[in-house]
Amino acid sequence: MSAEKSVVRNLNLAPQGRLKMDWAWNHMPVLRRIREQMIQEKPLKGKRVAISLHLEAKTACLAELLRDAGAEVAITGSNPLSTQDDVAAALVESGITVFAKYNPTPEEYKEHLILTLETRPELIIDDGGDLVSILHGERPDLLDQVLGGCEETTTGILRLRALEKSGELQFPMVAVNDAYSKFLFDNRYGTGQSVWDGINRTTNLVVAGKTVVVLGYGWCGRGVAMRAKGLGARVIVTEVDAIKATEAHMDGFSVMPMEEAAPLGDIFITVTGNRSVINGKHFPLMKSGAILANAGHFDVEIDKAALEEAAVSKRVVRKYITEYEMEDGRKLYLLCDGRLVNLVAGDGHPAEIMDMTFALQALCLLYVNDNHEKIGRRVIDVPYHLDEQVASYKLESLGIRIDDLTEEQEEYLASWKI
């Protein structure tokens, strides 16, 4: 039935996608452990689940886990250029309904989101808030059956908090992005590695000796800056938050406004979740050969319209690299049309990292299913016991043991007496 409903590029690509998924499963021990429990218990039996995530191999493993938990799963991509057509085809073969193609038109991308919601899900997993936004804006007729869901990324949580603050949020959502087992590892080590995987694979240029400007010093920015330093770059951080800027300084990075950094940078990487952080006043200041990349969820962090306006010509010089020639002859290079460089030009975060994140997604979805009435219409943090459970499973999979508190130590910590 999933094949009849699904919209994918080419079902004949399924064997290639299956190989990718098998490789990912082999490197996701935490997810495998939870899957074994789900197969036995079927905690989501009969439930309809809608997913909007970057549709590649690790995401496919999460979708299969939820299927094995008894759910009817429909999935779409959360970015037009991160869907892998072979993985989408393999998911259809595994009994999951898929509405996703690589590089759809904007109209097709929107249609795929709506088709996913028209499966009338009771639970959702969102990345960037597109499903939630459509439910509350264009398709409120599909709201009544939604029990709640989980949000994957910072951008989506910002949108959810705005909905909650306005009093318009209609169901509970868990801010998975804000869990320790997510941001400490996925945002920092996952983004840090995958961004440079994408940039290095695409440009085939050396990083050592270059000046890298990282815009934003949240957990993703920390990871990008850390890896740039490890590759031998000089790193400049730009920030609007005084505390984060102070931290960047104490971590050993130069900190300055973007207008001061613009003439110095060889590679610029946006990781802010905000729009136009590189804009029309910065392009005239940049040196010829500067490379512009984005690692934020939406393609709004680099002002592409202003870049087009400043340029006298443009051409694609390598796959995923567009050259913009300025009036004075300088050339600026935009990677991946300003979309997520780590997923468009790379394979996203390593499987061992997404193992923890998607384990959190699965456990939090079960939590929402069981507790949605008690939670109410609000955004909540991941319950700490679930966060700790994922970290414990991860340590066990690595063969690492840690100490337990003694009874005496627990009593001491619980007492006000010395």
Image: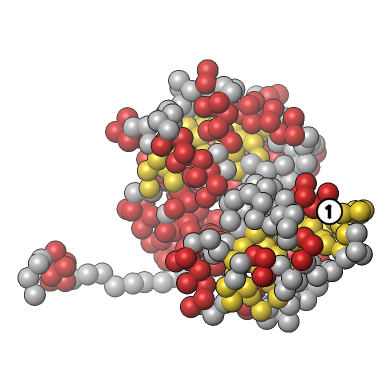
Residue 263 falls left or right of residue 22: right
Q: Residue at x 80, y 53 (%)?
A: 307
Given residues 175 and 66, the one toward you in this image is 175
Q: Quadrant of residue 415?
A: bottom left
Q: Is residue 202 visible?
A: no
| Amino acid at the residue labelled 1 | Ala
Q: Give the quadrant of the N terminus.
A: top right
Q: Residue at x 66, y 40 (%)?
A: 77
Q: Residue at x 78, y 76 (%)?
A: 206
Q: Residue at x 69, y 57 (%)?
A: 278
Q: Give the quadrant of the C terminus.
A: bottom left
Q: Say above or below: 65 vs 254.
A: above
Q: Is residue 212 visible?
A: yes
> How many numbered circles does the render carry?
1
Residue 62 falls left or right of residue 300: left
Residue 392 falls left or right of residue 17: left
Q: Position of residue 155 (x, y in %)?
A: 55, 47
Q: Quadrant of residue 351?
A: bottom right
Asked which secondary structure carries label 1, the reply is: helix
Q: Position of residue 321 (x, y in %)?
A: 83, 58
Task: Report the coloring of the rendering.
Answer: secondary structure
Q: Residue furthest left?
A: 417
Q: Position of residue 193 (x, y in %)?
A: 63, 66
Q: Say above or below: 38 vs 46.
A: below
On the image, numbered disc 1 is attached to which residue?
Answer: 310
Given residues 94 and 126, the one toward you in this image is 126
Residue 108 falls left or right of residue 389: right
Given residues 304 and 412, the one toward you in this image is 304
Q: Position of residue 171 (x, y in %)?
A: 41, 30
